[in-house]
Image (cartoon, coloured by chain):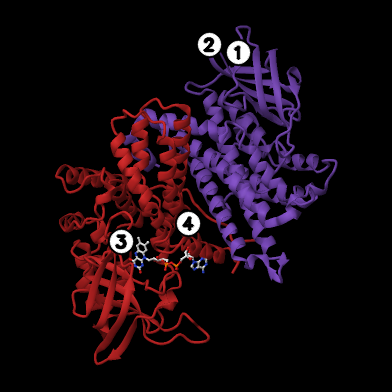
């Protein structure tokens, strides 16, 4: 999907093309590309896309921000752009201004809960928090006796055990031990941790779909270049059919993610409908990541299995993103329970309502 | 790089929801009156001429066609809603389905005016049934190997040979068929086939039913012996049938019938597990619903892009490819999940019966209307691989 009418996404694409070239990143040993990339993104206000202008953000619409994330997925961007956007969005829910620099969010898994203590401090542990080791701040959702709050916390104030996801991007365990937030405010009524999980799941779905678009593009291109048995491998029917399947998986991911993005951008007001859209996107995009990555590697043969080749930047990230903000297994159980609770004869009306 | 795949998040406009309520109310009345049983998908092959007329009376046939031919000039999205509600209800659409989806649009494009004026309004009234005569005993995926011959004679053509797997030929009033009018040429092996409108009620046609593994009789062998087709029944260009089957195929490939064929087993599974499913059932159902929702969103997207005048040919083929595979696998996934359902579940017998029918139906879903392999070839061409 190219959003030619979206200047924000175009800006992002231009920056990714100039400063996040996959070939260059795959060759880099020291990560020297990261600082200029982040600087360019920050100079253009992209990390704070979803922060309202009166809080010093860019005040971009949800839909425009989603298009930026699709583009980030297509480039398998490995700086915390998505996380900072998500954090800015979360803080804005409670009218807390976003600080400059990289921010991440916690919890990043529906299994973890943070507690807001009576003295206003935050306690608990969050696993799999993306880029916590690189972020200066963490935006959190915590619950206490007084209800649900959103808070801004200094990363330095937490204990952070570094970890890595499949693609070697930070995925850390953050322990909050009576940490005093820089700012904290009650969440708007009706907003709780599920709201963050839904948004996070959608963000990851868009990134996965974007990564699949690129996997398809480079696989098709490679099949037209590589020669075996005196033919381009694109001329073998088995390869053609594999690529057709990859196109199918990419299509499913794109359709599911863009539909959910449209739903969250305002086309759905009914809670069950939003849940169906977002859960489906995370489930279907994750399934597509598995099938699609396998085909992309198959088509590339051994060269795609090397660190030097760019392919793994997309395949491993798409596979890793499945785990964040609830895996497909988590969302499937929740969606199955919702469907069962509504009853058999309400299933079709729910599906048809979208 | 390849041209980007596009699946815009198209939503059905509000008029579609009004229409959906009308269709549901109509189907509920028909069920109450005993016209059909929504829990008996295996009866979906039965012929229901009265039902067909009543659907026509509602204005739900030829919905997108010009009014001068009895059509209703409504949108493809409105037609989409009618089609999906009929499919979900397991309504007996056999008599009008092919005419409404495929044959009517071909006539609109290629038939002479007097034939359009004669036949299209009758399709819209639900009075006529169409069949499609493409496949032959030695020509299936390879359409251009067709041999059944049309020989020029005074005022028309004489047809000799046979078609096979012809769905509904036993009840059809007409067939749209391709016949060989010239040999293929060295330069173009697709050359030499011509599309014709055949009146099935005229002499020289024998229809022999063929039993299917489900026990149903849906398709037939159709044998032509000096069957006469008048000149004005030739559709489109002489020897040029191959040029005439491109863009309208997108409608045929991507509709709701391409993934909802076995949907009923999913509803019945949800009923069987009850309101508090165990984790395994919940996860299984959740995944299937996510896949279903995604399929439908893809299909609606293609319908919307077609309505907007685009030709998403690759996208439509993709919808059919993954949609038919999905509906084929669905009964097997439901069977796995149903293995631990309480044996006393009130609908156990219905679920078992539906499952065994759906599992028997499943193999045809990736063969009829072009096999998975053929579709993937089309997608590969769209990706620029061939
Ligand atoms: C229920 C049902 C209803 C039908 N109704 C109609 C109808 O109304 N009218 C009509 O005309 N036809 C109808 N058909 C026929 C249908 O269109 C054909 O069955 C279909 O096109 C495949 O042709 P075939 O059966 O001859 O198989 P074949 O073409 O012989 O194919 C056999 C196998 O070989 C594979 N294959 C063939 N060519 C290639 C290739 N180039 N590359 C890779 N694999 C290949 C196929 O994919 C398939 O797996 C119906 C079929 C079914 C099952």
Check contact, mark 2 vs mark 4: CB within 8 A.
Answer: no
Check contact, mark 2 vs mark 3: CB within 8 A.
Answer: no
Of circles 2 and 4, which is in front?
Answer: 4
Q: Position of residue A220 (x, y in %)?
A: 64, 60
Q: Indicate the secondary structure of the residue bearing disc 3.
A: loop
The quarter of the image holding the N terminus of chain B is bottom right
Residue most extreme to the right: A30
- Looking at the colours in the rendered structure, which chain would you say is drawn in red? B
Q: Is residue B2 above or below residue A42?
A: below
Q: Colour of chain A?
A: purple
Q: Quadrant of ligand 1?
A: bottom left
Foreground residue, A166 or A80?
Answer: A166
- Residue B321: image tag: 4
Residue named by callout 3 = B64
**Residues beneath discs 2 and 3 located on the same chain:** no
Q: Establish whether ligand 1 lies closer than 8 Å to the Cβ of label 1.
A: no
Check contact, mark 2 vs mark 1: CB within 8 A.
Answer: yes
Residue named by callout 2 = A146
Of circles 4 and 1, which is in front?
Answer: 4
Q: CA distance from mark 2 to mark 4?
A: 52 Å
Q: Position of residue A101 (x, y in %)?
A: 73, 31
Residue most extreme to the bottom: B154
Q: CA distance from mark 2 to mark 3?
A: 57 Å
Image side of residue A296 versus residue B373, left or right = right
Q: Establish whether ligand 1 lies closer than 8 Å to the Cβ of label 4.
A: no
**Residues beneath discs 3 and 4 located on the same chain:** yes
Residue named by callout 1 = A116
Check disc 1: other Cα within 10 Å, few if <14, some if 14-19, many if 20+: many
Q: CA distance from mark 2 to mark 1?
A: 9 Å
Q: Establish whether ligand 1 lies closer than 8 Å to the Cβ of label 3.
A: no
Q: Residue at x 53, y 53 (%)?
A: A248
Q: CA distance from mark 3 to mark 1?
A: 59 Å
């Amino acid at each position: 999907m190219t959003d030619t009418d979206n200047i924000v996404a175009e800006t992002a694409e231009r920056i990714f093309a100039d400063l996040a070239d996959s070939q260059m990143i795959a060759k880099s040993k020291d990560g020297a590309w990261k600082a200029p990339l982040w600087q360019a993104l920050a100079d253009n206000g992209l990390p704070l896309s979803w922060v309202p202008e009166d809080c010093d953000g860019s005040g971009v619409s949800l839909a425009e921000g989603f298009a930026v994330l699709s583009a980030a997925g297509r480039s398998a961007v490995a700086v915390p752009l998505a996380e900072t956007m998500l954090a800015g969005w979360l803080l804005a829910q409670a009218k807390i201004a976003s600080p400059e620099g990289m921010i991440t969010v916690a919890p990043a898994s529906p299994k973890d809960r943070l507690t807001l203590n009576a003295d206003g401090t935050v306690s608990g542990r969050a696993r799999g928090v993306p880029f916590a080791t690189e972020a200066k701040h963490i935006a959190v959702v915590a619950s206490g006796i007084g209800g649900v709050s959103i808070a801004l916390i200094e990363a330095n104030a937490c204990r952070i055990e570094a970890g890595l996801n499949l693609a070697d991007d930070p995925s850390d365990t953050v322990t909050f031990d009576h940490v005093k937030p820089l700012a904290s405010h009650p969440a708007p009524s009706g907003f709780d941790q599920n709201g963050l999980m839904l948004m996070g799941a959608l963000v990851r779905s868009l990134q996965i779909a974007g990564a699949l678009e690129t996997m398809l593009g480079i696989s098709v291109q490679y099949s037209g270049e590589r020669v075996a048995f005196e033919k381009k491998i694109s001329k073998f029917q088995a390869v053609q059919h594999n690529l057709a399947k990859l196109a199918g998986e990419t299509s499913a991911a794109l359709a599911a993610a863009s539909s959910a993005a449209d739903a969250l951008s305002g086309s759905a007001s009914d809670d069950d409908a939003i849940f169906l859209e977002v859960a489906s996107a995370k489930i279907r995009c994750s399934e597509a990541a598995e099938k699609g990555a396998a085909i992309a590697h198959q088509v590339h043969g051994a060269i795609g299995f090397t660190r030097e080749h760019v392919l793994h930047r997309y395949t491993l990230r798409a596979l890793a993103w499945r785990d964040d903000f609830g895996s497909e297994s988590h969302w499937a159980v929740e969606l199955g329970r919702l469907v069962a609770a509504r009853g058999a004869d309400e299933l079709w009306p729910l599906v048809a309502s979208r | 790089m390849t041209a980007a795949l596009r699946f815009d998040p198209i939503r059905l406009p509000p008029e579609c929801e009004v229409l959906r309520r009308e269709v549901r109310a109509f189907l509920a009345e028909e069920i109450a009156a005993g016209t059909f049983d929504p829990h008996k998908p295996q009866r979906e092959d039965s012929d229901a001429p009265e039902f067909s007329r009543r659907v026509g009376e509602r204005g739900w046939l030829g919905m997108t066609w010009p009014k001068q031919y009895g059509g209703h000039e409504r949108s493809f999205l409105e037609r989409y809603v009618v089609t999906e509600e009929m499919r979900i209800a397991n309504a007996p659409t056999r008599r009008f389905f092919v005419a409404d989806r495929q044959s009517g649009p071909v006539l609109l494009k290629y038939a002479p005016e007097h034939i359009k004026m004669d036949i299209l309004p009758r399709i819209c009234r639900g009075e006529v049934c169409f069949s499609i005569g493409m496949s032959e005993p030695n020509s299936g995926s390879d359409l251009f190997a067709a041999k059944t011959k049309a020989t020029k004679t005074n005022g028309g053509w004489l047809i000799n040979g046979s078609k096979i797997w012809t769905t509904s030929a036993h009840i059809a009033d007409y067939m749209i068929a391709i016949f060989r009018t010239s040999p293929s040429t060295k330069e173009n092996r697709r050359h030499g086939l011509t599309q014709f409108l055949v009146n099935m009620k005229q002499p020289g046609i024998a229809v022999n039913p063929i039993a299917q593994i489900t026990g149903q009789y849906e398709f037939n062998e159709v044998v032509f012996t000096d069957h006469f087709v008048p000149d004005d029944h030739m559709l489109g260009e002489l020897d040029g049938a191959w040029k005439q089957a491109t863009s309208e195929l997108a409608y045929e490939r991507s509709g709701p019938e391409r993934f909802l064929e076995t949907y009923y087993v999913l509803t019945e599974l949800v009923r069987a597990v009850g309101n508090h499913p165990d984790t395994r059932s919940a996860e299984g159902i959740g995944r299937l619903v996510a896949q279903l929702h995604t399929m439908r969103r893809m299909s609606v997207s293609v319908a919307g892009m077609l309505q907007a005048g685009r030709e998403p040919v690759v996208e439509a083929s993709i919808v059919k490819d993954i949609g038919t595979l999905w509906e084929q696998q669905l009964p097997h996934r439901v069977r796995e999940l149903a293995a631990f359902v309480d044996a006393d579940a009130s609908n156990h017998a219905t679920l078992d019966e539906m499952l065994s029918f759906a599992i028997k139906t499943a193999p045809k879903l990736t063969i009829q209307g072009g096999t998975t392999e053929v579709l993937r070839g089309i997608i590969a061409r769209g990706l620029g691989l061939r």
